[in-house]
Amino acid sequence: MKYEEFKELVLAAAKNQGLKEYELYYMEAETVGADVLFHELNQFSTSSEAGVCFRCICGGKMGYAATEQFTEAEAQRIVEAAMENAGSIENTESALIHKAGDLYQEPEHAPEERPSSAELIRLALDTQEQAYQLDSRILDGTNSFTQFQKTTRSLCNSNGLDLSYTCSYSLAGCIAVAKDQEGMVDGDRIKAARFSELDPKEVATEAVEEAVANIGADTAETGSYTVVFVHKMMATLLSAFFPVFSAQAAQQGLSLLKGKEGQPIASPLVTLTDDPFHPDCPVHMPFDGEGVATRCKNVIENGRLITLLHNLSTAQKDNTVSTGNGQKTGYASAVSILPYNFFMNPGEGGSQDDLLKAAGNGVFITLLTGLHAGANSVTGDFSLSAAGFLIENGTKGRPVKNFTVSGNFYELLKNIEIVGSDLEFKLPMASSRYGAPSVLVRNMTVAGK
């Protein structure tokens, strides 16, 4: 049975049960990918899933039930199961079903057709061959891959909402492996875009350049350094500490930004934006997991906190309106607060070379690892394994690795002295994407040898 037919059965069952407030959320996801190793196809995979979540308000409480089975019996069951679930919930928070009346922006990117299997495999093979041709030091073990992802989300409810959109993107990646005197070093590049915009030589070149630049890396000396974070690593820090910008975290006492709206919390050079329709990002989302229209908004503007990100529940508690960030990462997932395209706006600091020149001497960090264990989103403290290059007389010097950079995210935002112009977005994480330009921060603690 197709979703549209199943939807009508669920809505009829809800009416028959006398429900006044209810919602049906549908999500369908398709992923196709090719992986290449040793000059040949290593793996080709396809996966797809589709399911719905029915939510209803009974006795002032929200109950829910989910299924992947689209049958007449299941349509009746999930309505009854959601009602039963509502009766067992002890949570006293207000249950909300969004009302109609929002204006929804039309996504600029129409979903693209799925590339053929042959096209995906050819792109992966071409990317790997480019890596081998670019530098003789690139070894077998170099891996390349491609993937196509397509997602459809639909939401209808008892208040008259009936929404649907489909988005898709492709990605190409390369992990280039080279050898130095101590073992193997690698570099990677993954680009997400429309399939026609993926260039195998571009992807391979960046991976190979990163790999060979790491040959002969030593450990940095312990000390206090001027640090330049490359754009991807500043975006990585944003992704690790995003929870501090969640109204839910603030209300639970898990963010130090509670009650700080309108106050300066960062350098005046810093503006953070969440834009569901950023032109450089392939996924545009017109409504969130509760049916609220999404919109572009500055979270920090010129160093001042403008807003935390809200869903319907947190907005009601703070006597404000939802920012349209009540997302569902899967059809059966609870509504959480997540960004769309969340990024630090580019500044006037220029290129990476300009930032290195301004630093004079210091460390250029191009890799951070250990964020799950080494970053505390409640306090903002972090201590992360890092790699990169020394900055010597304003230029990129010898590579360094196996050192730790420590600091506090809140203080880092305040101490940013230069914001570059080289905005770069990371690979999408579910429906969220994080981006940043390179930034310069002075007096950061580095522990090495």
Image: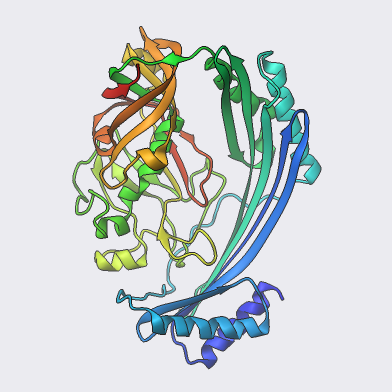
What is the x, y in percent for residue 437? 41, 30
What is the x, y in percent for residue 79? 53, 83
Is residue 160 in sight in this rendering?
no
What is the x, y in percent for residue 22? 47, 80
Quarter of the picture holding the N terminus: bottom right
Residue at point 64%, 54% (across, down): 150
What is the x, y in percent for residue 53? 53, 72
Q: Compared with residue 398, is residue 168 higher up or lower down, i.e. above or below?
A: below
Residue at point 58%, 87% (across, down): 12
- Colour pattern of the rendering: rainbow
Answer with the quarter of the image where residue 92 lies: bottom left
Residue at point 22%, 48% (across, down): 256
Image check: 56 left or right of 39?
Answer: left
Quarter of the picture holding the C terminus: top left
Is residue 64 in sight in this rendering?
yes
Q: Compared with residue 370, is residue 48 higher up or lower down, i.e. above or below?
A: below
Image check: 119 left or right of 306?
Answer: right
Instruction: Say which of 171 and 224 sits in front.
Output: 224
Instruction: Say which of 300 and 222 sits in front.
Output: 222
Image check: 202 left or right of 293?
Answer: right
Residue at point 24%, 29% (across, down): 415
Which residue is the extreme one toward the top? 393
